[in-house]
C-alpha cells in the first residue's frame, strides 16, 4: 500500500493496476485486503475445488461461512442472546415495508423521527399498513440537523429513526431513551461505532456501505417480536420464517454473506468497533476541518452538532465550481464525490474501508482547489 493509492507491482516489475480512491455512497469501497482474499479464494474455496458461489447453500462448507458471519457480527456488535440475527434480501427498502406489514395495523400507530429521504420512504410504506405520526422532523431546514426528541408518546407500536442520513450527512450522536420499542435503519453507519444494541428492538441495514457488497440485508431483532407478525403476511415476508430456518428458508445470497464474513474478519483484525470508531472520527475530522478552514469556500450542509462521520456533505459557490471540483478530483483518481441527485453539491462517503490517508488526500486536494479558484 502506498499512501492514498494502491499500485500492484507484477513479479516482473510492471505496474498493473492503480486503484481509485473511492468515496461512493453505496455500493462503496471495500477493504483491499478483503478483495484480495476473495480473489485468492475465488476459484477454489477452502479446498472445495469450486468457488464459494458454486457451493450448495445446504453444504457444510457454506454453513461454516454462514455461521462465521453470524457469530462475528454478534461478537463485534456485542448482540445480546435475546436477539435474532437474520440475513435477508430486498435491501433496506424492503424493511421499510416488511416491518409495518408484520407489526402495524389500523389500530396501531408507529411514530417517526424524520431526518431525511430514507425516513420519508420508511414513513410512506408504514402508512399503507397502519397509523403513523411524525414526532420530530428537520425537513423545514433541508434535513440539516437531528431534531430534539420531544416526549415520546406511550401509545406507539414503535418509534422509527434513521441513525445516519446518507444523503444529507447527519448522524445521531446520542439515541433517545424511548419508552416504546425503537426501530432503527442503520444502513449507513452500522459497525462504524459502538452502539448499545439493547436500546433497539429492531436494527436493519443494507450491506453495501460498511458490511460488504449489496445483496444481503442484516436484520437484528429482539426475539420477543418473532411469532407476533400479522397473520395475512406471505410466509417469505414473515421474520419468524427466516429466524426458524436460520436465514436458510430459501437460497440466501451466499456470495454476499461470504463477503460479509470477510469484512467482519477484517474489522476484528483492525481492533473492532472501538478502533474503527476512533479512526472514523479522525477521518471525518480531517474533512470537516478542510471545510471549516476554507473561509466559506466550502459550506458544510450539516449543522455542527449533527455532523455525520460517514457522509461529509458540502456545497461550493455554484454548480459550475461544483462540477469543476468533481471533474478535477476525478483527474486525481478520486471518485464518488458528487452529492445525491436530489440535493446536488458534494458528498464524501468515508465508510470503514476508506483510510485516513484517503481523507488526507482529499483534504489536500480541497485546499489546493480552493487556492486555485
Ligand atoms: N436507508 C439508508 C439510510 C440508505 O442510505 C439507503 C441506501 N443508500 C437505504 C435505506 C436503501 O437501501 P437499499 O438500497 O439497500 O434498499
Image (cartoon, rainbow, N blue to C red):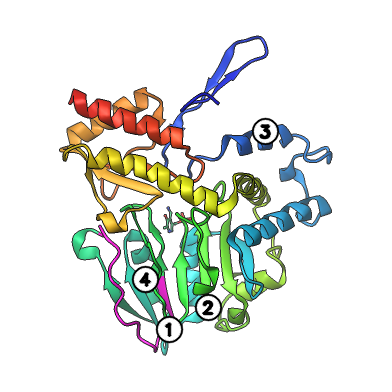
From the viewer's perspective, is the residue at label 2 or at label 1 nearer?
A: 1
Depth order, front residue of 360/68: 360
From the viewer's perspective, is the residue at label 3 or at label 1 nearer?
A: 1
Which residue corresponds to mark 2? 102
Mark 2 vs mark 1: which is more N-terminal?
A: 2
Within the image, what quadrant is residue 298 found in?
Answer: top left
Q: Residues within 10 Å of mark 1 (few under 14, many from 20)?
A: some
Mark 3 vs mark 1: which is more N-terminal?
A: 3
Which residue corresponds to mark 3? 39
Instruction: Tell whether label 4 touches label 3 (CB within 8 Å).
Output: no
Which residue corresponds to mark 4? 123
Which residue corresponds to mark 1? 179
Does residue 266 appear to the left or right of 172 in the view shown? right
Q: Position of residue 324 (x, y in %)?
A: 24, 28
Residue drawn at x 67%, y 37% is 38
Judge whether 359 appears above or below 98 on screen. above
Amino acid at each position: 500500500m502506498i499512501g492514498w493509492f494502491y499500485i500492484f507491482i507484477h513479479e516482473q516489475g510492471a505496474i498493473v493496476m492503480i486503484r481509485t480512491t473511492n468515496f461512493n455512497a453505496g455500493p462503496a469501497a471495500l477493504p483491499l485486503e478483503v478483495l484480495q482474499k476473495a480473489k485468492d479464494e475465488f476459484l477454489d474455496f477452502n479446498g472445495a475445488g469450486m468457488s464459494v458461489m458454486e457451493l450448495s447453500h445446504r453444504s457444510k462448507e457454506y454453513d461454516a461461512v454462514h455461521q462465521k458471519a453470524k457469530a462475528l457480527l454478534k461478537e463485534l456488535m456485542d448482540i445480546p442472546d435475546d436477539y435474532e440475527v437474520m440475513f435477508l434480501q430486498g435491501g433496506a427498502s424492503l424493511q421499510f415495508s416488511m416491518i409495518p406489514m408484520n407489526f402495524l395495523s389500523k389500530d396501531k400507530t408507529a411514530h417517526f423521527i424524520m431526518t431525511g429521504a430514507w425516513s420519508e420512504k420508511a414513513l410512506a410504506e408504514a402508512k399503507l399498513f397502519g397509523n403513523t405520526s411524525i414526532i420530530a422532523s428537520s425537513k423545514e431546514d433541508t434535513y440539516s440537523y437531528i431534531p430534539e426528541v420531544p416526549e415520546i408518546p406511550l401509545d406507539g407500536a414503535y418509534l422509527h429513526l434513521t441513525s445516519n442520513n446518507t444523503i444529507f450527512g447527519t448522524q445521531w450522536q446520542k439515541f433517545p431513551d424511548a419508552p416504546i420499542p425503537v426501530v432503527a435503519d442503520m444502513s449507513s453507519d452500522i459497525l462504524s461505532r459502538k452502539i448499545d444494541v439493547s436500546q433497539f428492538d429492531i436494527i436493519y441495514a443494507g450491506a453495501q456501505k460498511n458490511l460488504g457488497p449489496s445483496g444481503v440485508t442484516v436484520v437484528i431483532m429482539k426475539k420477543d417480536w418473532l411469532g407476533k407478525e400479522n397473520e395475512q403476511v406471505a410466509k417469505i415476508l414473515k421474520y419468524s420464517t427466516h429466524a426458524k430456518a436460520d436465514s436458510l428458508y430459501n437460497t440466501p445470497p451466499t456470495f454476499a454473506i461470504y463477503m460479509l464474513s470477510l469484512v467482519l474478519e477484517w474489522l476484528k483484525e483492525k481492533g473492532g468497533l472501538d478502533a474503527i470508531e476512533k479512526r472514523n472520527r479522525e477521518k471525518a475530522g480531517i474533512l470537516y476541518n478542510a471545510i471549516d478552514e476554507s473561509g466559506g469556500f466550502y459550506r458544510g450542509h450539516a449543522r455542527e452538532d449533527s455532523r455525520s462521520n460517514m457522509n461529509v456533505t458540502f456545497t461550493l459557490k455554484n454548480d459550475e465550481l461544483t462540477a469543476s471540483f468533481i471533474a478535477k478530483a476525478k483527474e486525481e483518481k478520486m471518485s464518488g464525490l458528487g452529492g445525491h441527485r436530489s440535493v446536488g453539491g458534494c458528498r464524501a462517503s468515508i465508510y470503514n474501508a476508506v483510510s485516513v490517508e484517503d481523507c488526507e488526500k482529499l483534504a489536500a486536494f480541497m485546499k489546493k482547489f480552493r487556492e486555485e479558484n
